[in-house]
Image (tube, rainbow, N blue to C red):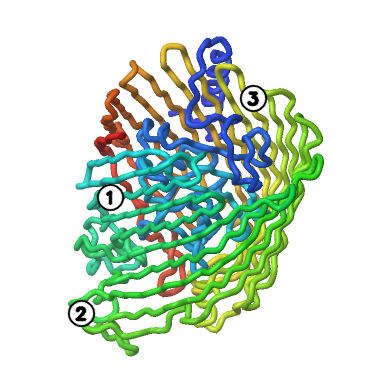
Amino acid sequence: MSDPIPSWLQIFPWLALLVSTWAVAAEDPFYEGGLDNFLAEETELATKTRLTIDYVPGIIDVIRGESLAERGVRTVWDALAFVPGINPVMDNLGHRRVMVRGLGDIGDNRFSGYVKMMLNGVSMNDSAKASADPLFFIPIEQVDRIEVMRGPGSAIHGEHAVAGVINIVTYSDRNMVFVSSGSFNEQGLGLSMNHGLAADPVNFSLNLSAWRSDGADMRVEKDTLYQIGYGDISNAPGNANEGIVAKTGVFRTKIHGFSFLAQWSESRLGDYFGTNFTLPSQDDRLVEHDRIRQIEGRYNLTLGSGRVELFLGERNHLVTKEHLFINPGEYYQSGAEQDLEGKSNYEEQRRYWGVDYHQNVGRHRWLLGLYQADVNVLQGTQAFNMTNEGAIVDDFVPQSYPIQRDSGRYINSTMVQDEIRYSDLFSVTVGGRYDHYSGGIGASLSPRIAGVWRFSEARVFKAQYGRSFRPATLYEIGANALLGASTALDPTTVDTLEIGYFRKYPLAEWRMTAAYSELRDVIVYSAESYAFSNADSGRLRSVELVGGWGTGTGLWLDGSLSVTDTDLSSVNGHIPGSSQFIGRVGARYRLNSWLVGALDYRRVEGFSRQPSDPRGERGYDIVNLTLTARSESGYSLRMGIGNIFDSQVAYPSFLLADSSGEPTVSYPDDLVQPGRTWWLEGALHF
C-alpha cells in the first residue's frame, strides 16, 4: 500500500482549480458577482469612515445575506464558513465558536474572546467571558450582509478585536415574512418591516425572528467516565442533549440627524455533551439561557467643515443555567439516585458613551474618538445540589461565584486616526487607540499603520501592521481570586503584519492574502490548577486565496483556500483545535428567471491535537445542495440538503486531568455532529 499524500501537497489541486477559473473568467462576456464583490462594497468596519473595499486598509470581506441564502446557509455561524481563514467550531456545551487563522479557543481555555462580535455596528461581547453567543444563531433571512475583518482591529474597536471583527448587519429596507422547517423538528419564522426610504428624514424598520430545533441527539458510545474507570455509572451509550431555541429582534428609527437602535438576541441550549465532558441524561431539557439586550442613540451634527457623531447606550447581558448536568451522583456518593447538577445566574450592565469627530483637511481625513464604559455586575450566583461534605441532596446549596455582585470595571479609551490620501492611487492610514482599565488590569496601546496602492481600478495592493489586545475577563480574574491564585493577568497582545493583492477582471475577481502574527502573554487555563495565567507565546502564519467568475449561461463558480501554520510555546506545536488546511469550491447556477441551484463542497483538514493526545488528526468533507424558486408576485421557496453524502463531522474534544493529574481523553470519538439533513423555507416579499 502506497504512502498517503502529504497534507501540504494536497493544496495543489485546489490551486490548479482556482487558477483555471480565473483564466477562463477573463474570456467570459458576462460578470454576475458572487458572495461578495471584493472592490465595490462599502464598509465602515476598518476605519469608521465609509470607504469602498479597495480603499480600506486591512483585509475585509463583505458577504451578502441573499447570496448566502441561495447557497444553503441557515445562520450567521454557518455563513462564516464562507470566509477564508475562518473555521466555525462548537464546544462541548453547544456554544458556537470561530477559529480565525488558527486563533480561537486555545487548549482548555473555553473563554477565549479573540473576536469582536458586533450587531449593526455595536459591540456585543460581554466582560464576563468576552462572548456574544446568541449572535451566531441569527437566521440568515434577517441578515443584509456580514462584514468580516480578519486580523488586528483594536486600533478602532478596542478589546477582543484580536483575530478579527465580525459585524452582522440586519435588513432595514425590505418587507418580508418567512417560515421554515427542517430535520430534527426544526421550525422557524420571521418578519421584516420597513417604512420610509434611507433618504427620507423619518423612517423606521423592524426585524424579528424565532426558531427552534430538538437537535440531532447524536449517539455517544463512550465519554470521559469510561476513560477513568467509571463506565458502569456513565449515561453512555446514549444521546447528547442538543435542543436549541433562538430569538432575535432589531428596531431602528431615524429622524433627521438622530437615530435610535434597540436590539435583543437570545438563545436557549441543552447541555449537549456535558460541562465536564460526561454525557448528560437524555431528558431534552434546555438548561442554558443567554440573552443580550441593547439600546443606543446617536446624533450627527455638522460643525464647520467637520462632523461630530455622539452616541450613548446601554447593554444588558444575562446568562442563567438551570439543572446543568455535572456528573452522575454515584461518582461522588455510592447509591446516589440523583445526578450532581448546578445552576447559576450572571447579569451585567454596560453603560457607555462616546464621540467621534471627523475632519477633512486637504489630503488628510482625521478621526478623533473618545469612549467611556462602566460595567457593573448586577448578579452573580451559583449553587449545586451537594453539601460541603460531598453528599448529594434534593436542594441546591449556594456556592461562591467567581464574579461577585457589584463588581465590574471602568474603561476609558482615546483614538486618533489619519487617512492620508496622497492621490487616487495611494493612501496611508496611521493611528492608534489607548485603552485604560480599572481594577489593576492596566492599559493597552494599539497602534496601526496601513497602506493601499491602487495600481489601477482593478489592481490593488495592501499592507498593514497592527497591534491588538485582549484583557483578562471578569471570570478569569474572579476564578483566580477564589483559588487564591494571582489575579494580576496581563492583556494578551498580538502583533500582526498583513499583505494582500486584489485583482479584478471585467468578468472575475481574485485575491491573495498573507499574514504573520506574534502572540504574547496568552491567557490560558490549566486543567491541573484550575487557574488562569499568562503562560504562552506563539506565532501564526497564514495564506488565503479566493477567486470567482461568472458565465453568460447563469453559472457562477468560486473557491477559496486557506493554509495556516501555528506554533504555541506551551505545546511546542500547533494551537490545539486549529486546522492547517481549509478549502471550498462552490457553484451557483441560475436556470432561468425564477429558479437558482447551488452546490458547495468544503474540506477541513484534521484539527491539531494537544501534545499528550494519542488520537490522530481528524478532518471532514461536506457537500450541500440548495434550490431556490421565486415568483414575480413575491413568493419564494427554498429547499436544501446538507451533507449530502452523510460524511462524519466532528469537532475536537480536549484532554482532561484525571484524579492523579494525568491527562486523559474525554470523548474518544470527539464531538460528533449530525450527518445528512434537510430543510425547507417559504417567504413572501411585499
Residue at image location 64% in from the left, 50% down from the top: 152
Residue at image location 35% in from the left, 70% down from the top: 320
Name the residue nearer the viewer: 512 or 253. Answer: 253
Q: Which residue is mark 2?
A: 336
Q: Position of residue 636 (x, y in %)?
A: 28, 30
> First in sequence: mark 1 or mark 2?
1
Q: Position of residue 247 (x, y in %)?
A: 32, 54
Alpha-carbon span between mark 3 and mark 2:
66 Å
The N terminus lies in quadrant = top left
The number of numbered badges drawn on the structure is: 3
Q: Which residue is mark 3?
A: 503
Amino acid type of the residue tagged 1 in the rendering:
Trp
Is the C-beta separation of discs 3 and 1 under 8 Å? no
Above or below residue 13? Residue 362 is below
Residue 130 visible in image: yes
Residue 248 is left or right of residue 545, and the answer is left
> First in sequence: mark 3 or mark 1?
1
Alpha-carbon span between mark 1 and mark 2:
37 Å
Residue 451 is left or right of residue 296, and the answer is right
Amino acid type of the residue tagged 3 in the rendering:
Arg
Mark 2 crowd level (few <14, some 14–19, many ≥20, 10 Å Cα): some
Q: Which residue is mark 1?
A: 211
Q: Which element is circle 1 on?
A: strand
